[in-house]
Image: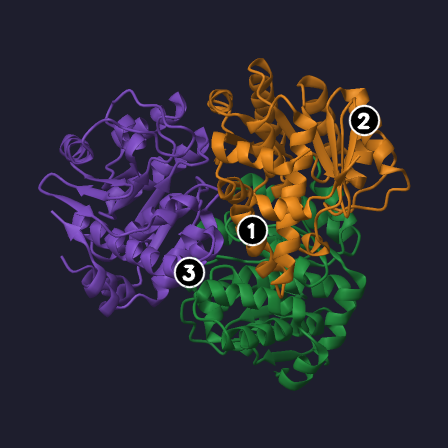
Chain colours: A green, B orange, C purple
Amino acid sequence: MDANVFLESVRTKRPLVHHLTNWVTILDCAQIVKSLGASPVMAHAAEEVAEMTGLASALVLNIGTLTGDFVESMLTAAQAANSRDIPVVLDVCGAGATAFRDRMCRKLIDEARIDVIKGNASEIARIAGLDVRTRGVDAAHVATDLRELAADLARKKSCTVVITGPVDIVADAGMTLAVHNGHAMMAEVVGTGCMAASVIGAFVGASPQDIASAAAAALSCYGIAGEIAARKSSGPMAFKHNLMDGMHALNAQDIAAMQRVEP
Amino acid sequence: MDANVFLESVRTKRPLVHHLTNWVTILDCAQIVKSLGASPVMAHAAEEVAEMTGLASALVLNIGTLTGDFVESMLTAAQAANSRDIPVVLDVCGAGATAFRDRMCRKLIDEARIDVIKGNASEIARIAGLDVRTRGVDAAHVATDLRELAADLARKKSCTVVITGPVDIVADAGMTLAVHNGHAMMAEVVGTGCMAASVIGAFVGASPQDIASAAAAALSCYGIAGEIAARKSSGPMAFKHNLMDGMHALNAQDIAAMQRVEP
Amino acid sequence: MDANVFLESVRTKRPLVHHLTNWVTILDCAQIVKSLGASPVMAHAAEEVAEMTGLASALVLNIGTLTGDFVESMLTAAQAANSRDIPVVLDVCGAGATAFRDRMCRKLIDEARIDVIKGNASEIARIAGLDVRTRGVDAAHVATDLRELAADLARKKSCTVVITGPVDIVADAGMTLAVHNGHAMMAEVVGTGCMAASVIGAFVGASPQDIASAAAAALSCYGIAGEIAARKSSGPMAFKHNLMDGMHALNAQDIAAMQRVEP
């Protein structure tokens, strides 16, 4: 898998990535998509959400600041995406923190086809039915093999599962990949998890025939930009901005030298 | 027209600019107003929106993440502004992307007096009734003379029309101006369009007797700050921050040397 | 009072700080908490808000972009916090600008126990019943002794009162402290007031037995980071990012040399 091929596909096709996401990191999600050369749009009104999804190449859902109404709009958008074979990425942000989040995630996963379920270890463990408590939106320790966790859930839900963390895991029914790119500073910045979902959205929007590989390529490129950013950043905000601009500047040479995706 | 005269008016009068805007770029809109030396306020609850508008010198509306309720609050605010002769700027963000957006724009324009209608080429074309499809919130190609488009709509609606793009067009019933300031990097940053509407809001709030010239001055200053920022910015985020700080630092010498506003 | 002791307590305990805050500065509030080494979470749905508060060490409420429903969720969260002795910080953002804001502040203060009421001079004056008009969310002049104002309100409401400004005042029933740290550039940046409430939230979450001192320590650390940031910042955005990264980097030596908290 050559992550640069997938990145070039994003830059050439400039997919429109429709988001229904949280109010905390919404601007970062939009900008990271734009910085990739793709086009973000955020819209959630019941009256237009299906029509907007119909214009898009990918749909990214993130339950960070969910309400009941907002999840209804997410479901409408996801079903519109399903009917047109537009890939749907669901960031199960904060799953395991409250019963309501768990219930809303279940609703989305049961009533629409989700192509990529993405979360940190404790969020995905919770989606898989384990008795894990997420502390707000930060990962809690999970005493399970993460590759197995991802692969099992992927098989059960017939989708791609992404677990982000020090090593990112990407699994679908047929394969599991481990992405070793990234940097510890990513965990000190609010929004890096949400942006990861948006980057995945742009990559699968440009390469919908190859979702798991596109997701792994997305995380590898994002992680490489993080590694480069960390070299020159003195604090979390400087790091975030360098990471975002690093996605804009990322080139084939850096990717060839730094990509670390393993089966 | 000397843009610096209008900028000094903003800095001296420090107008309060009330926004009902989208959740994506709301912080950028607030900060750019603050960086100009003016004062932003964001409030949308039905119970207070008219009272808050009554304190303000300008009202900026942006439908980026609209809902039906939110547009009702916008209308209430716009009518409160009308009754006190407070100028109203409407950013028709995403017009042409969905039927709902078109309908809500029509509602606002028909049921309140909008002083400045602002959008990119395909958004304004759509407001003018052309059969153009906006791709999310990014401009689509419009096969029409933009000066004519702006001037026609301005006459029809008795307002000022602003079309942003590589060259910004500002038209009212009596004149049309072309603002040649700006930089291509502005199109790579989420929020530059929204911030342009906020800058216009601050300028027309300080100079309500001269709306079209104030809008052109706003876009010229903003574009000059963009040109200066581009010289020292290596990526979109660095550019955005330099643009915003550039508005704070903008001085009469730079404006005199760089202003490019033509009839 | 040694502010560093309180800061170290935040870094060691890493409190989860639950926010119901405004949509303008929500990301800055989350990041400043994260940059302190603590953990932010933002959630407001009626169905989960009490459960999320139950996981937290502090609750921060900010009425910046309030609606009626949102205040209901704030009240539910505050009452859940009260029942578990989790400290509650209320930023009365924009109190005095509209009757609705005043009414909603009164509701929160009357129907829940608020541990820290925080605002600028005109906001707090309004909460104390003075006939002051806030201009949007920026402080208006208050012709009253601010120490007395804070101390009186603190006694009346049996809580800690914080008035932010060129000198921050912190008062509870037993003492009044004046924090002389900070920098004038803080007033040129949107979100510094909101972030101050979040920083106070993190500090009182880590030291709930000593709320007034923790709040003064929070403001001293935040002000020191602002003073350091100002030395190297050429504009408001650069300053904000340096301030935020400065909170991440703040060390005992800087605090010992620069802390200026006086009775």
Mark 1 residue type: Gly
Q: Chain of mark 3?
A: C
Q: Secondary structure beneath disc 3?
A: helix
Disc 1 target residue = B246
Tally of marks: 3
Q: Nearest the camera: C200 or A142?
A: C200
| Residue A98 appears in the rendering | no
Mark 3 vs mark 1: in front: 1
Dividing the picture into quadrants, the one containing residue C136 is top left
Q: Are marks 2 and 3 on the same chain?
A: no
Disc 2 target residue = B153
Cβ–Cβ under 8 Å for marks 3 and 1: no
Dividing the picture into quadrants, the one containing residue B133 is top right
Mark 2 residue type: Leu
Above/below status of B111 relative to A184:
above
Task: Bin the neighbour count of mark 3 within 10 Å (Cα to Cα): few under 14, some 14-19, many 20 and up.
Answer: many
